[in-house]
Image: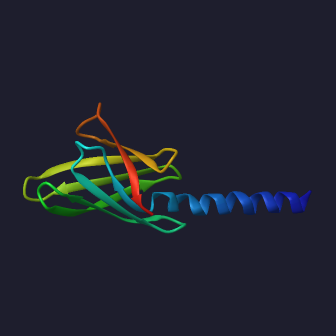
Amino acid sequence: MKNLFITLCLVLTSLTLTAQEAFNGMWQGDLDYRCGIAIFANEHEVLKVKTACFSSLIMWDEEILSQTKTELITKITYQPTGYTTEIIYTLQENNTILQKYSTKPKKYYTLRKIIH
């Protein structure tokens, strides 16, 4: 019984440790979405999030506020205009993420992984 418990703990720990890797990659939205997102993660945590806006040729880093197994919350501030928003990324099935901006609470973007 003790060995079973130890084995179960090891399996659950390994599943949790690799959960953040699901965020890792390049993500692109639908046709009306003009930005690409690069999320850099290892098996323990998301390390960096970079957004590149293709229409205005701007790139910025997102500040990571919190992260769980299936959710990542970041904040961006665009210095020239003072625009600040929090962004919630929620992992879905089939290499997709739902993205929601705090400044647009009723709108969701579906991001698809284009590079692993």
Number of labelled discs? 0
Q: Which of 3 and 49 is in front in this view?
A: 49
Q: Which residue lies furthest to the right in this view?
A: 1
Where residue 79 sits, quadrant-wise, is bottom left
From this view, report whether residue 104 is shown above or below residue 9. above
Residue farthest along the left direction in this orientation = 80
In this picture, residue 65 sits left or right of residue 60: right
Q: In this view, does 63 lie above or below 34?
A: below
Q: At which x and y percent is residue 55? A: 13, 54
> Viewed as shown, does residue 93 lie left or right of 12?
left
User: For the C terminus, which image quadrant?
Assistant: bottom left
| Residue 44 drawn at (x, y percent) | 53, 66
Q: Judge left or right: residue 71 versus residue 111.
A: right
Tell me the quarter of the picture where residue 43 sits. bottom right
Q: Which residue is drawn at 44% across and 47% down?
A: 96
Q: Looking at the figure, which quarter contains the N terminus?
A: bottom right
x 28%, y 53%: residue: 75
Q: What x and y, as percent, mark residue 90?
A: 44, 45
Residue at figure coordinates x 78%, y 57% from the top left? 8
Residue 69 is situated, as x and y percent measured from the top left of the image, at: 53, 52
Q: In which quarter of the image is residue 100?
A: top left
- Colour mapping: rainbow
Q: Which residue is drawn at 19% across and 50% down?
A: 84
Q: Which residue is nearer to you in this view: 6 or 24?
A: 24
